[in-house]
């Protein structure tokens, strides 16, 4: 990142939620397990699951800027939306508690799982423990509409609410991953040849968009980043990601630009839909756990890493390429999927 780019980010108020840069680690044991199939590719992970607050995960990077904006506006209540097992909701609750804001969550039943663990364990349990007020809405509900209605009620009581939509993926939230692009650019100086590809899960698209904007602002190619969508079709995810990347880039560098062809999202790991397990996900979660002792999650990183393993097996990458997978956290979600893992030996 150029000095100018750093200065652009410094214009935005940011609450420090990460202690330090998250480490990049090589997956030596997994590489050994893949053996010849690997074709000389080097596999690395960036540990964005390794953060001190609220169990960690990618949403904390967005929340640094979102809470910064909320505090600079003098807000006292953070309102956001998500699915019942939203990691964003959990980390919003934890980070709000950390900075002394109230937190209200409007959670919808988007995933067709009715078992008691999905309904009450994992992230939703933690949201309550972090002190958030939880409103559970039916799947068909317009949760963002409800969030704004709730904000009006709070305003009428003299409160000052701040509302952000799914996944914290507003352009301001995406600045967290534009800043992460700088962190990666620094760290990759010690990786021979740099990273050929950086792979991320794509839900509300902010992680991919923020990284793409961050690299574009540094004069590096945004095509360095690609994602596996776990929510939308490839076409829809690419469109949302592109629009968000443009809006984020506009906040930090009015002179740089990004094209729609710079954004590549694959949907071959989506399976039957958001939050619905696939055999490849179960296998990826178990492979990472058993070779490296690392936890992926069943909804986002498990599916995206299944994509990396499939790409390696297909020979998509070149010999010697260094591939970086962003571990985005979400392990509390595993506890919500106990019955799905139970007996599934894929
Ligand atoms: C663990 C985890 N990984 C990845 C993502 C996807 O990030 P984004 O919504 O920025 O696309 C999410 C989003 O909720 C998440 O919770």
Image: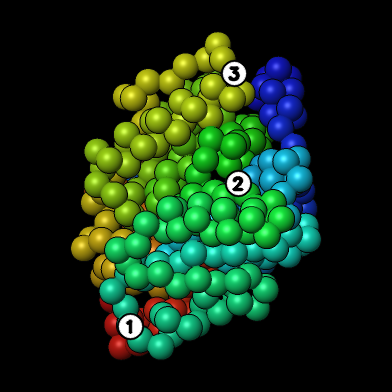
Q: Position of residue 124 (x, y in %)?
A: 52, 75
Quadrant in the picture for residue 265: top left
For image coordinates 39% across by 31% down, the residue present is 242
The N terminus lies in quadrant: top right
Q: Residue beneath label 3, please?
A: 253
SS class, disc 1: loop
Who comes first in sequence, dot 1 or dot 3? 1
Distance between the Cα atoms at labels 2 and 3? 18 Å
SS class, disc 3: loop
Q: Assess mark 2: CB under 8 A from ligand 1?
A: yes
Tell me, for residue 114, which label it has, or none.
1
Looking at the image, residue 260 sits to the left or right of residue 3; the answer is left
Quadrant in the picture for residue 320: top left
Q: Position of residue 79 (x, y in %)?
A: 58, 57
Who comes first in sequence, dot 2 or dot 3? 2
Neighbour tally class for label 2: few under 14, some 14-19, many 20 plus, Cα within 10 Å: many
Tell me, for residue 68, which label it has, or none.
none
SS class, disc 2: helix
Looking at the image, residue 321 sits to the left or right of residue 156; the answer is left
Neighbour tally class for label 1: few under 14, some 14-19, many 20 plus, Cα within 10 Å: few
Q: Position of residue 4 (x, y in %)?
A: 71, 17
Compared with 121, 272 (above or below) is above
Quick check: marks 1 and 3 in contact, CB under 8 Å? no
Q: Nearer the viewer, residue 280 or 81?
A: 81
Q: Residue beneath label 2, please?
A: 62
Compared with 176, 132 (above or below) is below
Quick check: marks 2 and 1 in contact, CB under 8 Å? no
């Amino acid at each position: 990142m150029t000095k100018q780019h750093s200065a652009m980010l410094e214009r935005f108020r940011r609450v420090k939620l990460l202690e330090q840069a998250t480490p990049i680690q090589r997956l030596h044991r997994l590489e050994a397990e893949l053996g010849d199939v690997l074709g000389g590719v080097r596999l690395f992970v960036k540990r964005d699951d390794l953060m001190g607050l609220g169990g960690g995960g990618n949403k904390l990077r967005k929340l640094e800027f979102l809470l910064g904006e909320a505090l600079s506006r003098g807000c006292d209540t953070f309102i956001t939306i998500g699915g019942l097992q939203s990691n964003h909701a959990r980390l919003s609750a934890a980070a709000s508690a950390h900075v002394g804001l109230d937190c209200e969550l409007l959670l919808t039943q988007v995933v067709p799982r009715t078992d008691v663990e999905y309904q009450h364990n994992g992230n939703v349990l933690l949201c309550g423990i972090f002190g958030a007020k939880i409103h559970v809405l039916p799947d068909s509900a317009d949760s963002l509409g409800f969030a704004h209605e709730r904000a009006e009620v709070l305003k009428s009581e003299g409160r000052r609410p701040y509302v952000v939509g799914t996944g914290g993926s507003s352009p301001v939230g995406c600045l967290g991953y534009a800043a992460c692009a700088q962190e990666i650019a620094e760290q990759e100086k010690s990786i021979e040849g740099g990273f050929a590809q950086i792979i991320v899960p794509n839900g509300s698209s902010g992680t991919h968009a923020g990284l793409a904007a961050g690299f574009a602002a540094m004069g590096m190619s945004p095509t360095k980043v690609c994602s596996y969508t776990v929510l939308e079709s490839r076409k829809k995810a690419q469109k949302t990601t592109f629009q968000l990347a443009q809006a984020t880039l506009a906040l930090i560098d009015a002179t740089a630009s990004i094209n729609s062809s710079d954004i590549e999202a694959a949907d071959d790991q989506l399976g039957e839909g958001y939050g619905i397990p696939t055999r490849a996900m179960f296998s990826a979660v178990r492979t990472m756990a058993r070779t490296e002792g690392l936890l992926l999650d069943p909804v986002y990183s498990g599916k995206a890493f299944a994509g990396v393993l499939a790409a390696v097996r297909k020979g998509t990458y070149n010999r010697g390429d260094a591939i970086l997978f962003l571990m985005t956290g979400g392990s509390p979600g595993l506890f919500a999927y106990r019955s799905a893992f139970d007996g599934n030996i894929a």
